Amino acid sequence: MGTDDLPETLAGLLSGIQRLMRRNLRTGVEQPPLRGAEVELLRLVRASPGIGVSAAARELFLAGNSVSTLVNQLTRRGLLRRETGQDRRSARLLLTPEAETRLNLWHERRITLVKEQLELLAVQDRDALEAAIPALRRLADGLEATLVER
C-alpha cells in the first residue's frame, strides 16, 4: 500500500471496526439497542453529571435541538433524568440506575470482545497494534482540534 492509499484505507478500517463492534455488541441484548449518538450522550452525562443540554451539544458537536431530541427519547426510555437547573429555565442531565447498568454492561462486553479478538492475533500483530496507539491518539487529537477550529 502506498501513502496515497493510507487515508482511505485507514478511514475505511476504523469505521468498519466500529460498525462490526456495534453489531457484535447488539447481539444477545434484550433491551432495544442504543444508537451511537445515544451512547455518546449517556457517556458524556456519566462523565459530567448535571451537564446541561447546551453544554452537551457543544461537547458532542451537535445542534442543540438534536441533543434535546436525544434527551427526550432517553428520558422516555428511562435512561436519563432531567432536573431543573438553578435558573429554572435550564435542565441538568443525570443518568438513571438503568442507564448506569447498561453502560457498565456495554463497556464490559466491548472490552471482552476486543480482548478475545486480540488473543486470536499473532504476537507480532498485537505488538504492532500496541505500537500504533500513540500515533492513533495523535490522529484523534488532530481530528478533535479540527472540529474545535471550525
Image (spheres, helix red, strand yellow):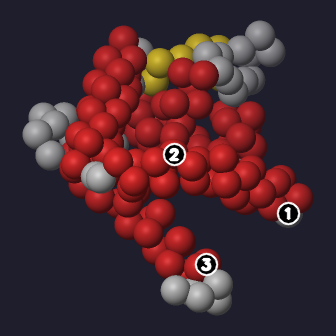
Vertical arrangement, residue 3 with respect to residue 21, above or below: below
Q: CA distance from mark 2 to mark 1?
A: 31 Å
Asked if residue 80 can be seen in this view, the reply is: yes
Query: Residue 78: horizontal and vertical position, in percent?
Result: 34, 24
For the point 39% across and 55% down, the residue is: 125
**Residue of label 3:** 7
- Judged left or right of residue 18, residue 27 is left
Q: Tell me which corner region of the image, top left, top right, bottom left or bottom right, holds residue 79.
A: top left
Question: Of the residues tagged 2 and 1, which is closer to the observer?
Answer: 2
Question: Of the residues tagged 3 and 1, which is closer to the observer?
Answer: 3
Identity, as a three-letter code, of the amino acid under mark 3: Pro
- Judged left or right of residue 72, residue 140 is right
For the point 35% across and 21% down, the residue is: 104
**Residue of label 1:** 150
Q: Which mark is residue 130?
A: 2
**Callout 2: few (<14), some (14-19), or many (20+) C-alpha neighbours within 10 Å?**
few
SS class, disc 1: loop
Residue found at the far right of this picture = 149
First in sequence: mark 2 vs mark 1:
2
- Judged left or right of residue 41, residue 105 is left
